[in-house]
Amino acid sequence: MQTEPQASPTDQHAADAAPQDAAPVAPTALMDIATARITELEAELAEMKERWMRAEAETANVRTRAKRDVDDARQYATQKFARDVAEAAENLRRGLDAIPPVASDEIALVGRLRDGFTGVERSFLDLLDRNGVKREDPTGAMFDPKLHQAMAEQETADHPAGTVIQAWTQAWTLNGRLLRPAMVVVAKAPAAAIEPPAVDTTA
């Protein structure tokens, strides 16, 4: 008589470990799972896009600041030297102002010196102007605290209050940035005349 083969322990273990048939998932549940996953992915994408845009904006700001710093360094690296040169130009002007005015009986040498120094000053100012250093005469302009330093006030009815009526020194700028403020005298409205008290003549 033939006997049926006995299952080995290994076969029995495999049979026990075999998965059971999974219960079918309803279509609406699958749709809900897919919709939730899509929503999650869209949220992640929006967050990544926002981070990327912030990073791009920060990079653009860094580039802008770096360019501005380079431009400032290029334009204003000589600021201290330019300030000293402006002082030299002021001293040259003081020397010219010290030369006596033109007179019919003046010595010829004085006239030649005046003309020579005036030409030197003109060339010097043209050289400074080509390099961004400019001299500005504030006389007649309204007082500007960004460019002028008031050294005194003078009462006058000939000029509007706040007008620069005299400049002791000129304003100097380097590419639009103030190097030396102008030392100025500013017009001030005259004080109102004090009228004497009326005298009662009826007494």
Image (tube, grey):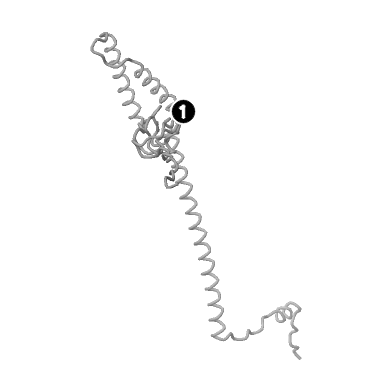
Q: Residue at x 26, y 14 (%)?
A: 103
Q: Residue at x 74, y 78 (%)?
A: 13
Residue 113 appears at what percent x and percent y? 30, 12
- Check disc 1 and give the amino acid type: Lys
39 or 104, which is in the foreground? 104
The residue most toward the left is: 104
Residue 179 appears at what percent x and percent y? 43, 31
Left or right position of 114 against 94: left
Q: Which residue is mark 1?
A: 80
- Tell me the quarter of the picture where residue 144 sits: top left
Quadrant the N terminus occupies = bottom right
Q: Residue at x 35, y 32 (%)?
A: 139
Taking 152 as reference, is 64 above or below it?
below
Residue 38 appears at what percent x and percent y? 52, 73
Taking 39 as reference, is 182 above or below it?
above
- Tell me the quarter of the picture where residue 76 sits: top left
138 or 45, which is in the foreground? 138
68 or 145, which is in the foreground? 145
Q: Residue at x 50, y 52 (%)?
A: 58
Taking 90 as reference, is 24 above or below it?
below
Looking at the rendered structure, the secondary structure element under dot 1 is: helix
